[in-house]
Amino acid sequence: MRVRVNSKYKYEPVIMDKCNPANTGLEEGDIVKVINKHGCPPANMMGQCYVEKDGKFMGMVCTNSLVKR
């Protein structure tokens, strides 16, 4: 799945995100915004993207974990 930067999605983690302890603070059903970080790979690179929740950076997740609202 491809996502668009600055769009909001519902977070429904796939098994890869459930097993990844680096994604702290995100829970199933959270509304997140896809962002690009300066100096980092852009969204959709290798099926991953960076997200923020309520303006706070939350980390990298699989694009398959994001569902259109």
Image: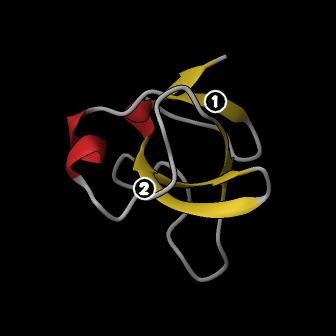
**Mark 2 or 1: the one toward you:** 1
| Residue 38 in the figure: left or right of residue 45 | right
Q: Which residue is mark 2?
A: 45
Q: CA distance from mark 2 to mark 1?
A: 18 Å
Q: Position of residue 23 (x, y in %)?
A: 41, 57
Identity of the residue drawn at 20% across and 48% down: 19
Using the image as rendered, state which of residue 25 and residue 12 is in the foreground. Answer: 25
Tag 2: residue type? Met
Q: Residue furthest top?
A: 69
Quarter occupied by the N terminus = top left
Using the image as rendered, state which of residue 9 and residue 18 is in the foreground. Answer: 18
| Residue 10 in the figure: left or right of residue 44 | right
Identity of the residue drawn at 51% across and 54% down: 25
- The answer to which quarter of the image holds residue 69 is top right
Task: Label 1: state its secondary structure.
Answer: strand
Using the image as rendered, state which of residue 21 and residue 50 is in the foreground. Answer: 21
| Residue 8 in the figure: left or right of residue 3 | right
Q: Position of residue 7 (x, y in %)?
A: 74, 37
Q: Position of residue 44 (x, y in %)?
A: 48, 48
Q: Residue furthest bottom?
A: 39
Task: Label 2: state its secondary structure.
Answer: loop
2 or 1: tag closer to the N-terminus: 1
Identity of the residue drawn at 44% across and 59% down: 24
Q: Which residue is mark 1?
A: 9
Tag 1: residue type? Tyr
Q: Taking 42 as reference, is 33 above or below it?
A: above
| Residue 9 in the figure: left or right of residue 24 | right
> In the image, which disc is placed on residue 49?
none
Q: Position of residue 61 (x, y in %)?
A: 42, 50
Mark 1, residues whose alpha carbon is within 10 Å: few (<14), some, or many (≥20)? many
Q: How many marks?
A: 2
Identity of the residue drawn at 35% across and 65% down: 22
